Amino acid sequence: MTELFIPTDHEHMQIKPGRRTGFPVMIGVHSTILGPAIGGLRIKHYDLASDGLADVLRLSQAMTMKAAAIDNGTGGGKTVVPIPVGVEITPALKQAVLLDVADHVHALNGMYHVAPDVGTGPADIDIIRRRTPYSGGYSKEAGGAGGTTYGTFIGLETAVRAAVAQSLGKDSMRGLTVSIVGLGGIGTLLAQTFAKEGAKLVVSDIEQSRMAFADELGATWLTPDEAMLAECDVLAPCALGGVLAPSVVANLRASIVCGAANNQLSTEEVAEQLRAREIVYVPDFIANAGGLMYASGIELHHRSEAGSDKHTRDKIAENVAQVLKQASEKGITTQESALELARQRLRNATR
């Protein structure tokens, strides 16, 4: 595990078979120091079950750091159910898996709250919620936040504005050029919002059908590779992770990088490369934390929708400002600044 850089400093880790399917239900609780662990459920095909275990351990730790960095009052966890390659995930099988997960989550008695991730959505969490209250990201019809898209969007919008204000001295997106790579739910909302404000947009997606949307906004359409290297004030990667590789960063023509994609840095060293080029990078686990904040605000902290909206925006603006300020004052990368912020909050909680 050490050689593969897989963390093993978890409070709890279990692998138990589901009594309906027999598939292993892997649940990792990295930390509950700051509150109950929250993390998504992945139901997907894996060539090796051990790859699923690696995901549990890595992603649960990442959730702890995200929650601590944004001061969300929660910890980090993860669930993976690795489905053997060749086994079709039929609706009946998926429901059986969801009920298996619900059994094991409930047995943890609130230590861990399961939420949507790869292969699951709010409707799936609704099924789990029939068996256990220890769940999040369920549908509005069930009294939840309706997933994480809206929260992630408002958090990202806020993060971009905070970075623009601090780095460029602008209080509006009007006249600024924004390159958005990935027009899923979050990228689409971001594009619509900034277009209405008068920003100049460059947009891209692997789906060519999204060109019609670009035309509607009067945006420039480029391929994803071209959009990553477009001359712009703000580059917003909102699709795949690992896009900020050394060769890409060497050719970036953006002043700020702030997007919704997870794990944007191909390696930790890239953060130093961005700093050396004086490109302001808002760490992805700060910029995309709104989904966690908004949903848990409604479902766990019992705020109103308006109250959770305001709290999410205010807290992310505060976090971005703090991370950028500390990085500048200490001469460190924004990635290290954000990680140090998380570590300090975890240390303070144990005193």
Image (spheres, rainbow, N blue to C red):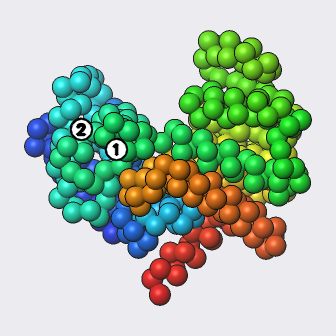
Mark 1 or 2: the one toward you: 1
10 Å neighbourhood of mark 1: few (<14), some, or many (≥20)? few
Q: Residue furthest left?
A: 19
Q: Which mark is residue 333?
A: none
Depth order, front residue of 336/171: 171
Given residues 337 and 189, the one toward you in this image is 189
Which image quadrant is residue 97 in?
Answer: top left
Task: Measuring from the top left, give residue 217's x and y in whole percent.
Answer: 75, 20
- Residue 105 horizontal side relative to residue 149, left or right: left
Which secondary structure lies at badge 1? loop
Q: 327 above or below 179?
A: below
Q: Toward which corner of the image does residue 335 lie, by quadrant?
A: bottom right
The amino acid type found where label 1 is placed reads Gly
Image check: 311 left or right of 82? right
Q: Position of residue 340 (x, y in %)?
A: 63, 71
Q: Which residue is mark 1?
A: 143
Q: Are marks 1 and 2 in contact (CB under 8 Å)?
A: no
* Location of residue 326 in the rendering, given as x and y in whole percent from the top left corner: 75, 70
Q: Disc 2 residue type?
A: Ile
Q: Residues within 10 Å of mark 2 (few under 14, many from 20)?
A: some
Find the distance from the CA under tag 1 to the CA under tag 2. Answer: 13 Å
Q: Position of residue 190 (x, y in %)?
A: 67, 35
Q: Nearer the viewer, residue 174 or 246?
A: 174
The residue drawn where x is 10% and y is 43% is 19
Q: In the image, 226: left or right of 143?
A: right
Q: Is residue 259 visible?
A: yes
Residue wearing tag 2: 127
Q: Residue at x 26, y 62 (%)?
A: 110
